[in-house]
Each structure stands twice: as C-alpha cells, then as structure tokens.
Image (cartoon, grey):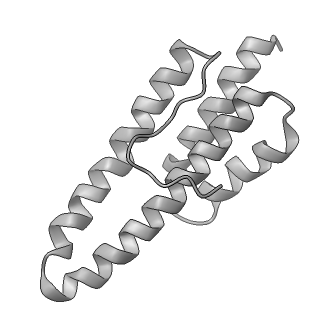
Amino acid sequence: MESVQQRKLLSGLCHGAIFFSSTIVTVAIPIVILYITEDSVVKANARESLNFHINLYIYGLIAGVLTIVLIGIPLLMILGVISIVMPIIALIQVLNSPDQPYRYPFIFRLV
C-alpha cells in the first residue's frame, strides 16, 4: 500500500472510530493505531482522536449530572450533534490533506 493511501486510511480510521459504537471500541482503535504506526501524522491524528473521545465522555458526564436541573438535556442534544458533525469534518480534512494532522477546536488535549 502506498504511504499516502496508508496515511489516509489510518488517519480516517482514527477519526471515524466514533461511528463504530459508543463503547470502548471507539477509544481502542486510536490507541492501537498510535502504538503500531511509525508515521508522525497518523500518530498526531490518533492522539487528537483520543483527546476528542475523552472530551466527549467528560462533557457527557457533566451534562448527565446537569440533567437534574434540566439544563443538561439540551446540552446532551448539542453534544450528540457535535459527536456526529465534528468527526465528519475531521474525516473530510484528513482525506483532503493527508500531510497535515487535523486539530479539533475547543477541546482539552490530555494525551
């Protein structure tokens, strides 16, 4: 497989992992890719994907707690839309410019 095609595939897989399920699989795929690849762009995309997943879990937990005061319900709906739209944007960016890692806006980078 050509290097650019492999970069597109692995980077796209990192960002698209969120669509497979909402369980540990979404986090496991970027972690595995982070450890098996030598490509710095793919590693950066895997880290960014992990950070996005971790942020979604944290924001979901906070919104879940806030449902007690009824402000969490709209926050959960907004979070649901963000969890679908942002990975699609990331996939498009990664496939259009495979030489640059995608950076999600407004997230904390923990990894």
Residue ranking furthest to the left: 70
> In percent of the image, x 65 and y 21: which residue is there?
8
> In percent of the image, x 56 and y 66: which residue is there?
23
Q: Is residue 13 found left or right of 90 in the rendered image?
A: right
Check the picture and name the quadrant holding the C terminus.
bottom right
Image x and y of residue 62, in percent:
34, 76
Image x and y of residue 28, in percent:
70, 57
Image x and y of residue 44, in percent:
67, 36
Q: Is residue 39 found left or right of 55 in the rendered image?
A: right
> In percent of the image, x 80 and y 14: which residue is there?
3
Q: Is residue 99 found left or right of 104 in the rendered image?
A: right
> In percent of the image, x 52 and y 56: which residue is there?
53
Return the residue nearer the eye: 81 or 101: 101
User: Which quarter of the picture shows residue 60?
Assistant: bottom left
As drawn, 10 above or below 105: above
User: Which quarter of the picture shows residue 5?
Assistant: top right
Q: Is residue 16 found left or right of 7 in the rendered image?
A: left
Check the picture and name the quadrant holding the N terminus.
top right
Image x and y of residue 66, in percent:
24, 81
